[in-house]
Amino acid sequence: MSGLLAFISREGDGRGRLRDVVAEHLMPALEEFEIDHEGLADLLGEQWWGVLWGCGFENFLGQRFEDGSIVDLYLKRRGWKETALNRAYFTALRDAPVSLYEVSNVQPGTSMALRDLLSDTAPVTVREKSATRMLKQWGRIAVRVVPERNHHVISRPLLPFRVEAVDFLFAGLCDALKLRKRDALRPSRDQLIGCAPIFTSAWLFIEIDSALTPAQPQFTNSDGHNVLFHDLRFPLGSGVTQRAIAERLDRVKGFPLEGARFWDGLVARKGRGGEAGGGNMVDAPIPALGGK
């Protein structure tokens, strides 16, 4: 890609057009969460900044301007410097829209099958080394599938989609395409190219929100069942004072005082059989007790 990137930086409005397309992919989420590019890299990691920029870059390659696509201009003026295989790849990448795929039949280091969730086409096997060592069976990814001679490959930017991101994406596509609830979500190639920023935005909104929202602790009892939190209030006898109650609670083993009038009976320990449970375990029958 070095020759193409150098051409874009020199070609008239090429650099500005690329910047604008990349901004379409990133700015909705950055503005919503009020973070900048540097903050995004700090939050998600430097590696994801490169992937996200690549999503915008590949979308830019498929854009049609008044003077044609940047790929067409490059091949017309500098194509003689590229091999026949490179010229064919640039053309195929220009025409390949991003879509959402379901991963199956993963052969680590070799290949995987991808089923397009936005079309009725049959799954296609792609040759891939690094991604197949990380992706899991039935995972969902946003990527471009590019034909190359007698097989298929995927483009470099690859976004693994959580379930929440898939729902966010489908809702965004339906809204952009003005589909009704009963309409099938089967966008055309041109529609997918136009909606490419929605894929990046859907991934970004969910990933940024997840990174900013601390994981909530899960609590189970000794049998591994989830704890349902609730309040229990007990009537006290006539003449009972707070001091008397405090003295009694102070004598309960494993029921420490956590404040002036607050005792906590929540502790973490291993589950039965020596195996750690799925979360913190409630050891006392009363999780916490406070008074006024």
Image: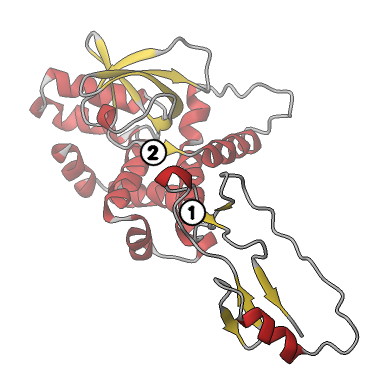
Q: Is residue 45 or residue 94 the one in the foreground?
A: 45
Q: Is residue 19 above or below residue 105?
A: below
Q: Is residue 216 or residue 82 the one in the foreground?
A: 216
Quarter of the figure with the C terminus: bottom right
Q: Which residue is mark 1?
A: 210
Disc ID at residue 159: 2
Disc ID at residue 283: none
Quarter of the image for residue 44 reads bottom left
- Across and down, in percent, residue 83 comes to 10, 22
Quarter of the image for residue 238 reads bottom right
- Across and down, in percent, residue 142 comes to 42, 33
Mark toward the viewer: 2 or 1: 1
Q: Is residue 176 or residue 112 the one in the foreground?
A: 112
Circles 2 and 1: CB distance less than 8 Å? Answer: no
Amino acid type at mark 2? Leu
Question: Which residue is outermost to the right?
Answer: 238
Taking the spot 59% from the left edge, 68% from the top edge, the residue there is: 265
Quarter of the figure with the N terminus: top left
Q: Earlier in the sequence, mark 2 or mark 1?
A: 2
Left or right of 178? Residue 90 is left
- Across and down, in percent, residue 151 comes to 26, 11
Q: Residues within 10 Å of mark 1 (few under 14, many from 20)?
A: few
Q: CA distance from mark 2 to mark 1?
A: 15 Å
Q: Is residue 1 above or below residue 259?
A: above
Taking the spot 56% from the left edge, 24% from the top edge, the residue there is: 187
- Across and down, in percent, residue 262 comes to 65, 80
Amino acid type at mark 1? Ser
Taking the spot 53% from the left edge, 37% from the top edge, the residue there is: 163
Quarter of the image for residue 45 reads bottom left
Q: Is residue 71 above or below residue 223?
A: above
Q: Is residue 228 or residue 275 the one in the foreground?
A: 275
